[in-house]
Amino acid sequence: MKVLKAKIAEKKNKQIKIKTDFIRLDSALKLADLVQSGGHAKTVIQDGEVKVNGEICPSRGKKLRAGDKFEFDLYVVEVVNE
């Protein structure tokens, strides 16, 4: 009998730097180059593919501040102040 082993892809860490108090989740996805457009960001957020601080976030207007982390695809992105 042949045993198959699956390799789970590791998450890649990124940072985005902001100069303001907060950034909206849809804008953060674009800034991190994880989506191609605002429409793409809206779709992946509404489809439940994005987590903010470990929880699925359906709100594209969610305000992210320094220290917050969001996850999409194979990336974990931390928001930091510039």
Image (tube, rainbow, N blue to C red):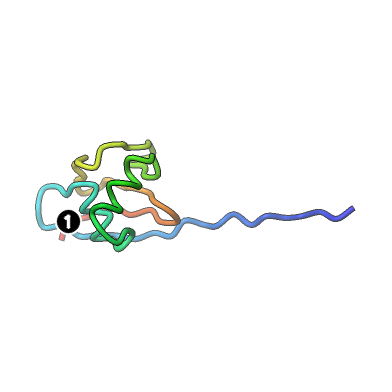
Q: In this view, does 69 lie above or below 58?
A: below
The total of numbered circles placed on residues is 1
For the C terminus, the image quarter is bottom left
Q: Viewer-proximal residue, 46 or 9?
A: 46
Residue at 19%, 46% in the rendered image: 65
Tell me residue 14's x, y (percent): 34, 60
Mark 1, other Cα within 10 Å: few <14 / some 14–19 / many ≥20: some
Give whichever of 35, 8 is nearer the camera.
35
Q: Position of residue 4 (x, y in %)?
A: 76, 55
Taking the view exactly as shown, the residue that stands out farthest to the right is: 1
Q: Residue at x 38, y 49 (%)?
A: 71
Is 3 placed left or right of 38 in the picture? right
Quarter holding residue 6: bottom right
* Residue that appears at 18% across and 47% down: 24
Q: Label 1 belongs to which residue?
A: 81
Farthest residue toward the left?
20
Front residue of 63 and 17: 63
| Quadrant of the image occupied by residue 8 | bottom right
Residue type at tag 1 = Asn
Residue 52 location (% of width, % of height) = 32, 41
Q: Is residue 35 left or right of residue 23?
A: right
Say left or right for 17 vs 45. Answer: left
Query: Can you say whether 48 is above or below 81 in the image?
Result: above
Q: Residue at x 17, y 56 (%)?
A: 81
Give the structural element (helix, strand or loop) at label 1: strand
